[in-house]
Amino acid sequence: MTNELLSIKDLEVWYKTYRGYAKVVNGVNLTVNKGEKVGVVGESGCGKTTTMKSILRMNVQSAYVNSGEILYSGENILKMNEAKLQEIRRRDIAMISQEPSAALNPVFTIGEQIRDVIRYSDTKKKFTKEEMQSKAIDAIKSVMISDPERILASYPYQLSGGMKQRICIAMGLVVPRNVLIADEPGTALDVTIQDQIHRLLHNLVEEKDMSLIMITHSLGVARELVDRIHVMYAGDVVEVAKTDDLFKKPLHPYTIGLLDCVPKLSGGGISEGIYGYVPSYINPAPGCRFASRCPKATQICREQKPSMTSVDAEHSVACFNYQ
Amino acid sequence: MENQGRIHKNTFMKESTRENMRMYWYKFSRNKLSVLGLLLVISSIVIAIFAPVIAPFPQHVEAFVDYNNASLAPSSTYWFGTDIFGRDILSRIIFAFRGALYMSIIVLAIAVPVGTLLGLIAGYFGGWFEVVIMRLTDIFLSIPAIILALSIASVLEPNLTSSMIAVTVMWWPWYTRMVAGMAKSYSKEYFIKNAELIGASKFHILFREILPNCISPILTKMALDVGWVMLIGATLSYCGLGEQPPTPAFGQMISDGSKYMPDLWWMTIYPAMAIAYIILGFNLLGDGISDMFNKGRQ
């Protein structure tokens, strides 16, 4: 692919724990093209956030990258020096966290914090106060908040959760960037607001021609927002497909199980879901990590790790028995 | 927040700051004791600044003897009586305010920034910075403060400067420890991570993100500490290690007077009451400030 912007290759991230190394991210491959919206779907604790945090090297100290590389326009982020990394953080990649209330400094007004983002986006250029103010106002307007002047002058505690999440999005978009990583931006909000936020994010990203990496545990959300979905299970990407393809023709037993979990309006009621739990990351079994929960598991699944097989150009799956 | 609608005007920055100040004052003044503390503190400062004007006998502060008026009980001429050299106790107390306040201010002006800076570095960067700085503070804090100050003050030449050095040396670790704890917990917060994410400089994160969040405990502790520094200063001067005679200092006046207790009680009681006055003032003020900040943040 020619317009590949960000690609993660065989990333392994381990957490150092008292009982040994937890092999949380187990060789993840992921690519994001220019202007593409990519979804990463998986249940809680499957390594989605860890993978995303590795992109900007924001992982906690106990996590370390065992192997793999993360290429951003041809350069390995994991091997960059601090200054180069800071440049990328300032200009190229933005991240929206899942906790809007905690993401804003309680002692500064929203305006001051947005101005900081603008100021750091280009340290050589000196922005005037008016310039920054008008940019901030534009950003706030773009996330559908009325009365931007008042919002800019207020402190985080004066705003609601939905407002704060929109402000976080505004902060991610105030400076034109290439990639926006949204880590479950709707989690802390109620469903109506969640829906608004997702639409907003979708529209803004299209408008500004950015790439989006959307992390979510809901396939429904992913279906509406993204072009291509990576399904993750226990630190592995188990299936990659165009959104429509994935919903029409899910191949991996885990994806099938996930889709089966979505409650249907007609017939069937609530499904039985996927039996069992996510396996322990410390000393995992040698084979496929899903084997213990998989309805189709055979002997080979418990002994060998399946590798990614391309079914067609845009669809690949890591399973021995996907037929 | 009352008057929320009024915060935003064209000059929204100034307007909201003024509004905040008013809110803080309202919260502060609701507790009458803190207002009393503020009055005591302001009066102490006024007394210290205008000492030569206020004191009835400014010349009694220097080397001065008047044996005709020695050891007089409080009267209308000498409100607080005179000491064994015939010097007016009131005038000497008024001048002692100067030394005490001067000492507190200098000590805190050095100990607070140094302690805070080290605390921020230890708390935010962690690793070896933290190990070295925090163990150093532990060492300082493990020595009883007064003994450390006494030994430093006695090694150096006994005067006000060396007692200030002694108190400063024993004072900064408290701020380091307090700020390091806060900085450590803040550095795990999402908003600090976010600042890192937008590529903010280390300087920005330390002084513009973490420090403003720590400012209210620091201010509260400072207000309380002014009184305590004075008390330690008085203790040192009681032991003869602070301001040297004839310049008056509370501790030294009490120590002189204690030899003549209880006959010349005014030589001891009045300086002691002056210390109580000033320390009470700063303590009440400190409590008021801490209440103000705690209630100011919903």
Image (spheres, coloured by chain):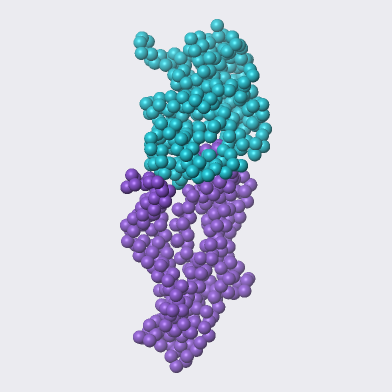
Chain colours: A cyan, B purple
When the figure is inspected, residue B101 is found, relative to residue B123, above or below; the finding is below
**Nearest the camera: B149 or B54?**
B54
Out of A309 and B153, give the one closest to the viewer: A309
Rendered residue at 61%/19% (across/down):
A286
Q: How many marks?
A: 0
What is the residue that sits farthest to the top in this orientation? A323
Is A302 on the left or on the right of B68, as rendered? Answer: right
The residue sitting at 49% across, 40% down in the picture is: A114
Q: Quadrant of residue A321?
A: top right
Is A322 located above or below residue B10 in the figure?
A: above
- Tell me residue A55's x, y (percent): 59, 30
Quarter the N terminus of chain A occupies: top right
* Residue B234 shows in this picture: no
Locate residue B149 relative to residue B226 in the image: left or right. Answer: right
Where in the figure is residue B226, as x and y percent of width and height? 47, 64
The answer to whether B27 is drawn above or below residue A29 in the figure is: below
| Rendered residue at 36%/56% (across/down) | B25
The quarter in which the C terminus of chain A is drawn is top right
Q: Is residue A165 above or below residue A126?
A: above
Of B192 and A302, which appears nearest the observer? B192
Where does residue B137 sit, x and y in percent of width and height?
A: 58, 55
Residue at point 51%, 50% (across, down):
B211
Q: Looking at the image, can residue A78 be seen?
A: yes
